[in-house]
Each structure stands twice: as C-alpha cells, then as structure tokens.
Image (spheres, rainbow, N blue to C red):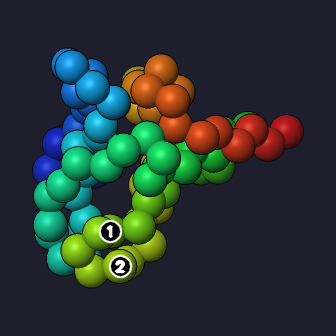
Amino acid sequence: MSGMSGLSGLSAAMGPVTFKAACPDCRARFELAASALRLAIGGSRRTTFYSFTCPECGRSVRKPAGERIVELLTGGGVSTLRSV
C-alpha cells in the first residue's frame, strides 16, 4: 500500500506508536494513535480491512489490509476484531 493513499507505517521512537495515514476524500495527511484505528480480520482479503475517522473532514475511511498492514497494526496495539 502506498504511503500517499493510506497507512504508510509506524513510528515508535520515544513514545506511543503512531501510524501515518491519509484521507482519500480531503487528501489530508496525518498521524493517528493506535486507539484511533480499528482492524477487522475476516476470512478473506475482501473482509480484512482497517478503518478510522479523518480528523480533518470527519469522513469514515475504510481501507483493505494485506498481511503487512495487519502485522503493523496488530504489533502497534490497534484494536482488532476477528470474524470466523
């Protein structure tokens, strides 16, 4: 996933983990705490995604989450919902 279109990584140096994200609607770029993100892990790629609310425009954003994104988010303490 590209850094410009969604979640691009995390920063844990000297403090809480934050994730860089971008809103596809207003195109704002920002950092979010783990508590501002939700991860849903489903039985397929289609049902595995992360979501957040854009702090700039208030839009609810939902993005697909591949293996690497799931690894980053779970390792960073993002609340995870698993479905069967």
Locate the C terminus and report the quarter of the image it occupies: top right
Residue 24 position, x and y percent, is 25, 68
Q: Nearer the viewer, residue 38 or 44?
A: 38
Q: Which mark is residue 54?
A: 1
- The residue where tag 2 is placed is 58
Residue 1 seen in render:
no
Cα–Cα gap, marks 2 and 1: 5 Å
Q: Residue at x 37, y 78 (%)?
A: 59
Q: Quadrant of residue 8?
A: top left
Q: Residue at x 32, y 68 (%)?
A: 54
Please say if 51 is above or below 31: below
Q: Nearer the viewer, residue 52 or 47?
A: 52
Residue 26 position, x and y percent, is 18, 77
Residue 80 position, x and y percent, is 64, 39
Q: Residue at x 23, y 48 (%)?
A: 31
- Among all residues in the image, which is located at the extreme front? 15
Residue 43 seen in render:
yes
Query: Mark 2 packing: few (<14 Cα in 10 Å), some, or many (20+)?
Result: few
Q: Secondary structure at mark 1?
A: loop
Q: Secondary structure at mark 2?
A: loop
Please say if 41 is above or below 11: below
Q: Amino acid at mark 2?
A: Gly
Locate the N terminus and report the quarter of the image it occupies: top left
Q: Nearer the viewer, residue 70 or 38?
A: 38
Query: What count of labels does the image hold?
Result: 2
Please say if 22 is above or below 11: below
Q: Is residue 84 left or right of residue 25?
A: right
Whether tag 2 and tag 1 are in contact, CB under 8 A, the answer is yes
Query: Mark 1 packing: few (<14 Cα in 10 Å), some, or many (20+)?
Result: many
